[in-house]
Image (spheres, helix red, strand yellow):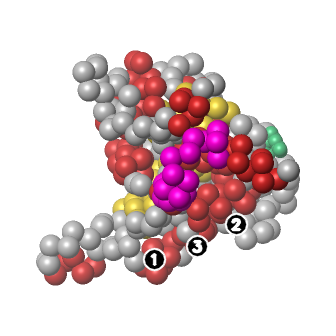
Amino acid sequence: MSSETITAPLVEVPPAGGEGRAPLAKKTLVSDHPTWCPGCGDFAVLASFYKVLEKLNYPQESIVTFAGIGCSSRFPYFVNSHGGHFIHGRSLPFAAAISLGREDLHVFNFGGDGDGFSIGGNHLFHAARKNTKMTYVIMDNSVYGLTKKQTSPTSPIGFKSKTDPWGAMEQPVNPMKTLLTAGATFVARSHATQVNHMIDMMHRAALHDGFSVVEILSECVEFNEGAFDSANPRKGGAFKTIELKKNDGSPEDAARHDPTDELAALKLALDPAPGHFGVFYQVKRPTKNQLERDLIARTREKTKGASALQLLEGTFAKMR
Ligand SMILES: Cc1ncc(C[n+]2csc(CCOP(=O)(O)OP(=O)(O)O)c2C)c(N)n1
Ligand code: SF4
Ligand SMILES: [Mg+2]
């Protein structure tokens, strides 16, 4: 590789959109035939995600979808984009590396409640606090679906499974509370039966400059049927949406939710199941991408135009 290649800017960030090209359409985004069980909530999440991509109209080659392991983590197979299927619970650091190294790409990560809050809990915590630019969609079915019904971190107390035949005994994770306290800068919640709401949440998440997470309650019809009926109006439940402040000075605005108010978001998160749906929290905080970009720029100023190769050679020389 010539030093010319190395000194060229590593990252060119093109504007989103497909100028001079046909708009991004579902037919080009569909990849493999989804292999989920008929009736699985994940189908609706996938259909909504295609819609979100159509709305965003990113150049197709700039879209990256990642996932760990699980039924929900099969997601990247069904999206015609760059992507990867990584070790159970470990897709976030992989996705973070792509986000940091290739800022021209739009990185989406998918997974289940087990992948995100159990084996991958540690990675989720650090991805959130580091605020690396990407969108993470957690399809929460409150069970390990792929491995055929074990208790997951979001299974409620009393849930009977292969690991808890007498009923789960331990306190489940509260996803919204966990994500808020971990430091995610965009936290939202939706339900797989509410397609327009899902599209809105994923679209807002994708446009957020930072680590954005959407938890979507997505029913596993095989191993946890009816788990989220209490939030499904068609099944007699209540889908309580969060009304965001309009800052229009109206008296009714006082009761609306301010998504920059962390304590108000935590209060919403503490409401018992089925809880609230919508944007709990959204703030601006420097992304890891921005911080690293600035650091590289400052370092490059000090090194007076030296190429990356020269810098590397200099470092090795000092180590001799
Ligand atoms: C390191 C490792 N541990 C355990 C497994 C087995 N395993 C595969 S998927 C899974 C749980 C999946 O549950 P979840 O993330 O909730 O996804 P779902 O299938 O419910 O969508 C487990 C335990 C694995 N593949 N790799
Ligand atoms: S086992 Fe459950 S989560 Fe997995 S595809 Fe079937 S319905 Fe969906
Ligand atoms: Mg699951």
Q: Is residue 303 magenta?
A: yes
The reply to whether residue 273 is in sight is no
What distance separates the C-alpha of mark 3 from that of mark 1? 9 Å
Side (left or right) of 52 relative to 137: left
Please report the residue visible at 44 percent of the width from the left and 44 percent of the height from the top.
193
Mark 2 C-beta closer than 8 Å to ligand 3: no
User: Which quadrant would residue 50 be assigned to in this image?
Assistant: top left
Please report the residue visible at 74 percent of the width from the left and 56 percent of the height from the top.
118
Give how far across and how far down residue 116 sits, in percent.
67, 52
Residue 181: mark: 3
Three-letter amino acid code of the residue under disc 1: Glu
What distance separates the C-alpha of mark 3 from that of mark 2? 16 Å
Graded by Cα atoms within 10 Å as few (under 14), some (14 to 19) or many (20 or more), the crowding at tag 3 reads few
Q: Secondary structure at mark 2?
A: loop
Please report the residue visible at 80 percent of the width from the left and 68 percent of the height from the top.
169
Q: Number of labelled discs?
A: 3
Say above or below: 280 vs 3. Answer: below
Find out whether the residues at labels 1 and 2 contact each other: C-beta distance under 8 Å: no
Three-letter amino acid code of the residue under disc 2: Pro
Give how far across and how far down residue 246 sits, in percent.
21, 69
Side (left or right) of 320 relative to 33: right
Who is closer to the viewer here, 3 or 152?
3
Graded by Cα atoms within 10 Å as few (under 14), some (14 to 19) or many (20 or more), the crowding at tag 1 reads some
The reply to whether residue 261 is in sight is yes
Say above or below: 20 vs 271. Answer: above
Q: Secondary structure at mark 3?
A: helix
Disc 2 target residue:
172
Magenta range: 293-311
Three-letter amino acid code of the residue under disc 3: Thr
Residue 262: mark: 1
